[in-house]
Amino acid sequence: MAAPQPGQVENPEDPTAILAVRSVSKRFGVVQALEGVSLSIRPGEILALVGENGAGKSTLVRILEGVHQPDQGSLEVGGNTQAFRSPGDAHAHGIRVIHQEPDIIADLSIAENLFLGDFRRVGGVFLDRRDLARRTRKMLSAFGLENELWPWTRAGNLGPAQRQLMEIMRALRTGVRLLALDEPTSSLTEDEAQRLFGIVRQLRGDGVAILYITHRMREVMELADRVAVLRDGRLVAERATSAVTEGEIVQLMVGRPITELFDRRARNPGPVVLAVRGLTTRRVKDISLEIRAGEVVGLAGLVGAGRSELAEAIFGHERATAGTVAVAGRTIRLRSPADAIAAGIGFAPEDRKSQALLLLRSVKDNITLCVPDMISRFDFVDPVRERELAGGLVERLRIRTPGLDQLVAKLSGGNQQKVVLSRWLARRPKLLILDEPTRGIDVGAKAEIYRLIAQLAGEGMALLVISSEMPELLGLADRLLVMAAGRIAADLPRTEATEERILDLAMGENLTRGG
Amino acid sequence: MMDAGVESAVEASGSPRGRSAPVRAIQAIGTHNFSLLIALACLVVIFGMLRPDVFFLARNISNIGQAIAILGVLASAQTIVIVSGGLDISVGSVLGMSTVCIALAVPATGSTALAILFGIGVGAVMGAVNGLIITLGRVNAVIATLGTMAAFRGVAFIISNGQSIPIFDPNLRFIGDGQIAGVPVTIVVLLLVVVLFFVLMRYTITGRNIYAIGGNPVVARLAGLPIVSYQIGIYALSGASAGIAGMLLAARTGSGQPLSGSQGAELEAITAAVLGGCALTGGKGTIVGGMLGVLIIGVLNNGMILTSVPTFYQMVAKGVLLIAAVVIAEYQTRRYG
């Protein structure tokens, strides 16, 4: 191998390691996904794995999990070299990965999911339900969940946090020595995340090795003992979290210092662009709000508070049972998103891959999806105008793609999100609704999206931004709406908003305090 | 996080740098279409060797062309339906209905053109009925068209009293047997339909929107596309195409037969589309691919007849081909994403 990278720590010749990765390299086509990565993890430690999208985190996890096999290098489990040919091999060695999308059987109960493959029988034939319930309750109480979950609850009815805990419990039941968590808090509320942290610490205490993959620096600092940073497939640093700052980690990830993330200049909002009066659907109740031209309004709240549902109602995707939506003073009839788009509303939904992108189509087709008139004559696509329009937006948003004909599925998360934004910029809507615009996106692309939002507001666009990341909302928004249980609980100017205050309002504590 | 295969494939493809000319040529044709061409070449070589005396005769090649004209029209329309995320298994019945309607309309109107228009129009209406059931009734496309497959066949029997109706019309016979500049008229009709559909899917906004709707209906709806009207239109188009196929059959057989199209026309059309690269989940597939699928089926059918494969075994072979096409497509999707 070449000379060690600056900042790289000792060769992990560590006899106590549960799992050691030795100079692992992996190529996909012309892309070197991992190059000479060595890393070891000891029992009873939490190792955070960070890096931008495309840095190789997922590839590394998939190698640990036996989905991919390394081109070069090897894995050692407890000092012995092992080749994992399938996830089954990895499981047999006590290595478990908890993915973002929980892997559970929705139609089975919690108990059945937990003990699938290990059912005991009565009389040699019948499932011993009493025994199953007893073992499940024992497991639940070890996590302090015995009052929250019932063994026979259908797993499909659980929330994302509960499903995740269920997966962790299932991993524990089958004897886990290394637990890898991939972005575990991405769909959790603050409270749920704290509970998860408690459980992760408890597992560390029991001697389980934890590999914690995340984008969130705060979680790295709060939870991890050590942090390993990947950049462009190489391990660029491996440090104790006590010996490093958030800023340094981010700098190691992107390879350059990130200066000011948010544009804090005061803006001068213009006339009212969006006026919602008494809007009610199945999930949101009696919503009234206004957004002005050149104003960025943040929508805060817990998962399930109805933020996305409100956005979908304003966009005509969810049918309203009462109330009106007016754009630039004109009430619009909302039968479908087509009506909202015609009125000048754009919407980048929460889940890029399932709601926004045509994964089998090219970058240019995705960008021009909502502006057929701009790129065609008598329904025939004009390739020159099409490339001009898409190319201009790719350049403006600095979308990293080998070309306009690249399949959008092959771009990284950040670039995919920029494609979604380009689609709407092509239409120049009066109001743009962004639901979790930076979820699962690396730090560099986040900064670019923040700049873009500020720039659009500067050009007079009204923006409604939904986010579960508090610092992001506080940094972006001129005004914050807090939702709780389907209603707007508060409307705060930026100067009066703090994380604590928002959280209180979101959890509805202002009501109990007699506010 | 993205899944690793996708994440690491960024910039892995699409870059022409460092690739040789043949590789670029294959990419231009499309790797899937290229493998279809190889399969077709293999079939031609095999049957050419087994029956060198007959296979390459102009008469036999013309026979293959005549035989695939009807299938080609059905398969290219089926390709559009599958790309849009649907499936139309009622096309065989609509075809039979169209032959009956034309046979009844020729003496009634005294005009070949009007009779043909009537046949195609009835097909379009039946297709629109499929579309309405699927969109407004929210019925799964397979079930909806399975139901209408039986119902339309029944209607064809009712209006024809279950009888074959002879057609005496020189214009229609010209469509069936005649030639334009040495090319059989049926082939000309096929080429017109294929070129029209190719342009629609490749060069128009409508075609792109069909790919969008089939690729992900939620995305299409959130992008403001009128999905319901598109779907009704697509099934109407499929019905009209079955009507055109019915015209070709009526012209060739000189009769309207309620039973025509009942011997696996929909099976062959779907097989051709899937062989051609259509994903049954929608959003993927091309007219060119579908036509290559048609050619493969046409050569296979012809070759099996020339080499005296018994009819029953031919049926088994066709069923196996459809399943094999889906298995291969599934394997490719898994391997290459």
Image: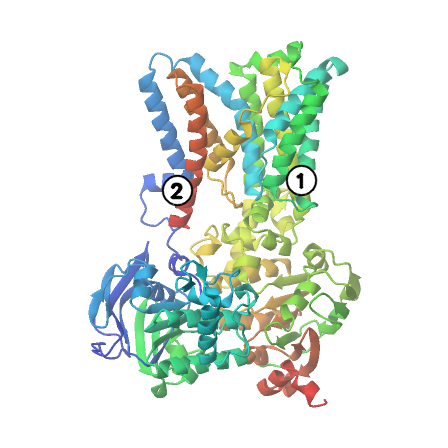
| Residue at 63% across, 30% down | B150
- Name the residue nearer the viewer: A456 or A36: A36
Task: Mark 1: give few (<14), some (14-19) or many (20+) Cα within 10 Å.
Answer: many
| The one of A455 and A91 positioned closer to us in this rendering | A91
Q: Position of residue A460 (x, y in %)?
A: 67, 70
SS at badge 2 = helix
- The residue that appears at 69% across and 36% down in the rendered structure is B128
Q: Using the image, determine if residue A437 lies above or below residue B234.
A: below
Q: Nearer the viewer, mark 1 or mark 2?
A: 1
Tag 1: amino acid: Gly
Q: Position of residue A512 (x, y in %)?
A: 69, 87
| Residue of label 2 | B27
- Name the side, left or right, on which B142 lies relative to A252: right
Residue occupied by mark 1: B131
Most foreground residue, A226 or A386: A226
Q: Amino acid at mark 2?
A: Gln
Q: Is residue B159 left or right of residue A13?
A: right
